[in-house]
Each structure stands twice: as structure tokens, then as C-alpha cells.
Amino acid sequence: MARQRFFEDGQAPTGVVSEAVFESWARCLRLHTNPQERATFQPVTASRTQLTLMKNRHLHQAWLDEVPRLETILSRTSCSAMLTDATGVLIGSSCVGRSHEALMPVATRLGVDLSEDAVGTTAPGVAARTGKPVVVLGGEHFFDSVRDMHCAAAPIRDIRGQLAGVLDLSSECIPFAFDAAAVAGLFSSAIENRLLVAQSTEHLVIRFQVAAELLDSAMVGMVGISADGHLAWENGVARSLLGGLASANQRAEREQDGLLGLSWPQLTALPATGAAPLALPNGLLVWARAEMQAPDGRRGLVPSVCPLEGWATAPPDADGQDTGPTIPTQAGPIAPADASPADESWPAVQASLEPQRLRDSDLDLIQRTLQACSGNVSEAAKRLGVSRGLIYRRLRMAGVDDKVCSV
């Protein structure tokens, strides 16, 4: 009915199809004129295909890392997954060529142009054109010859916030029996997160979520912070958890106040494995960890140390024993992942990052600070960023007479 109203009667099918589909029909009608024409799924030139793969190598690798899970999840459905670059050129597919499929084996060849200009209204084409998630079902496709397809696509963005590619789930002849848009959105986020990390060769990457077990999932919030302490990028989940940024001025104010409520040394002190509790500036308590990748591709993890009042735990020692909470004396450089104890270029770094037990080190820090403050507990607490009660408790636990301290 919508097609008849639009293509034959020239009326807008408002309320019958989505705005995205209607707008795509209007664009395609100016290009293709006749929806009864047969859509042809043609690949671009071999040289352009190779250039596209080279330009999108990080995106393609992120896709390859997620394909095994995607294939397992979709194996008992009628769906296949496809990945295109930002222009709509196909660079990855999980199509297995099921017996009832006629279009899928043709449309999922490497290098096929799935853009709106080439094949009319399809989910990957519209998503590549608009940068927004979209579902196109059956007769919502522009060309009649494609009406057996059911597609759901979601965009993937890079560290600049620009469209990097599109993930699409498609089923031929058989309608979706599940929320394909939700699944496409989940896996596009997983691929996007991998892409963001791969492109962050000079950024400190912070992962955070309200539950520690979500830090390795597609639902993790992630931000990339440059060496000068500025926010380089943030994914959609991080934006939601932080409350969003309505303007560049708000972004600048947040960075001045300390991104995530922490200074650069405190951010680098987040653990590289496991997770540490972190109170965001908006009051939300999340779990977080940090990592950094060297420019040469070697993975260098941030040392697992935390501030005096932190709850993070240092990695177990060589005997597998918990070494307890740790505190940093200063922020240090990040060693390459393959740096060995015998590496002569890192002796000073290794010495400065050697974890100390809190019970062996915080008392000395407190006493030195108290001495510098002439015994004034309030002033010492302010300098250390802790409560006066914590200082008194530490002194009493260590058997130190706290009567010499002033309020």
C-alpha cells in the first residue's frame, strides 16, 4: 500500500513506512526512476577493492576478531552478517550460501557496491548514507527484485567520530524471528570498540561500566585520552554514563575539572587488569581500568597502582599471593608489554613501578606529611586527599601515638 501510494499516486507514505525508508525512496527515485528495474549487485574494480581493504585494515581486523562469535550466534538462524566500509563497499561477509538463497551469494561477494546509489534502498546502503541504524524489511526495499530481503544495519565510527563502516544482518525470504536491530547494534559496538583501541596508538584508553564483568563486553564505556590530558574520543556508552556533552564548552570545562574526576597521574594509576571502583563527576560509581598501546603496535599496559584512598588490588606476586592494595609515589612511563627484567633500557622504570604494600608505605607517607604540616592532621589530610579519620586509624593500627597530632 505504501509503495502504491508513493510510486503510483505520488503521495508521501507517512505513518506507513519509516522516515528513513521514505527519504531513501525519494533519493533513489531521482537516480533510478523505475523500481521495477532489476537491481544488479556489481563489485567495484579489483584495484579499488584492494585499496578499500588496505585503508580499512583496522576495521577489517576488528571484524575478523568478532566473526567467530557472530557466526556461532547466527548459525541456527537464516541470517548472514556483512561489513561494508563507509562508502558501502563490502569488505567482509559470513554468507554460507544456503539452499534457498539466490540474492545473498551474489550480493555478498567481496567488493560489491551496496551503496544506495548502486542498489537502491537497503539497510547497509541507507546506514552508510545517513550514519544511523536502520531496518529495511521486504517491500521496503526500493527495487521489487530485492523484496525477498530483510536487513538490519548499524554504523561503526572511528576515533574521529566519523563513519568507518556498517555492520548488516540480512535474511533472504525468511523474516527475522528476533530483534535483528538489537543484535546488529550490539556487534557493531563490539567491532567499533576494537577499532577504537586499534587506532589509539597514542592514547590512554579507559574502560568503565557499572559492573566489572561488563568491561570486556560490547556494553563497556570507553574513552581515549591524549598525552596532554585532553579527551580524544569517547564511545556511545561512555557518553551515556558521563551524561553526554552538549557543547564544546562543556567538554572544555570537564577537561579542566579533570576527566572522569581524576587527574592524569590518577588515570594512569588505574589497574591494567581487573578493575577499580571509580566515582564519576556526576556521582555514578563505576568500575574502571586503563591500558595503552605503543605507537609501534606493542601493547604496553599501565602499571597496576592506585591512590591512597583507592580500592584497587595489585597483581599477585610470583608465588600467587595477593600483595594487597598499592599506592604510587609518582606517575611513571609505561613499559612495552615485551620488556623483560633483563632489558637494560628499563631498569629505572622497573624500579619506580615496583609495587609497594600499603601497610609498609602509607604510614611513612602519612608521617612525612604530618611532619611537613607541623602535626596538623587537617592540613595533612587535605594534602593527601583523605579524611582525618583515615590518618588517625592508620596511626593507631601502627601503634603510633597520635596525641602529638593537632586537629
Image (tube, rainbow, N blue to C red):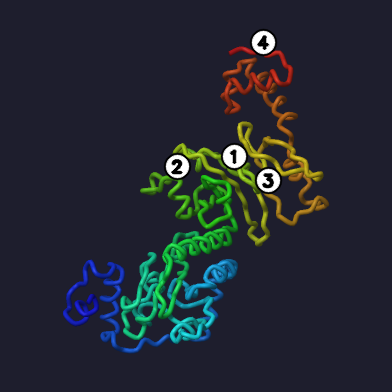
Q: Could you tell which of marks 2 and 1 lies nearer the N-terminus?
A: 2
Give, as a three-letter code, the residue at label 4.
Answer: Lys
Mark 4, Cα crowd under 10 Å, few <14 / some 14-19 / many 20+, is few
Q: Could you tell which of marks 3 and 2 lies nearer the N-terminus?
A: 2
User: Which disc, if any, is residue 266?
Assistant: 1
Q: Residue 288: where, in percent of width, then height? A: 57, 45
The one nearer the camera, 78 or 96, is 78
User: Which disc, if any, is residue 254?
Assistant: 2
Q: Could you tell which of marks 1 and 4 lies nearer the N-terminus?
A: 1
Give, as a three-letter code, the residue at label 1.
Answer: Gln
Mark 1 or mark 4, whichever is nearer to me? 4
Real-space Cα distance between discs 4 and 2? 41 Å
Mark 3, Cα crowd under 10 Å, few <14 / some 14-19 / many 20+, is many
Mark 4 or mark 2, whichever is nearer to me? 4
Real-space Cα distance between discs 3 and 4? 37 Å
Q: Answer whether residue 41 is visible to the viewer in this image.
A: yes
Q: Are marks 1 and 4 in contact (CB under 8 Å)?
A: no
Residue located 24% across and 78% down the image: 3
SS label for mark 4: helix
SS label for mark 1: helix
Q: Could you tell which of marks 4 and 2 lies nearer the N-terminus?
A: 2
Q: Are marks 3 and 4 in contact (CB under 8 Å)?
A: no
User: Which disc, if any, is residue 303?
Assistant: 3
Real-space Cα distance between discs 1 and 3? 11 Å
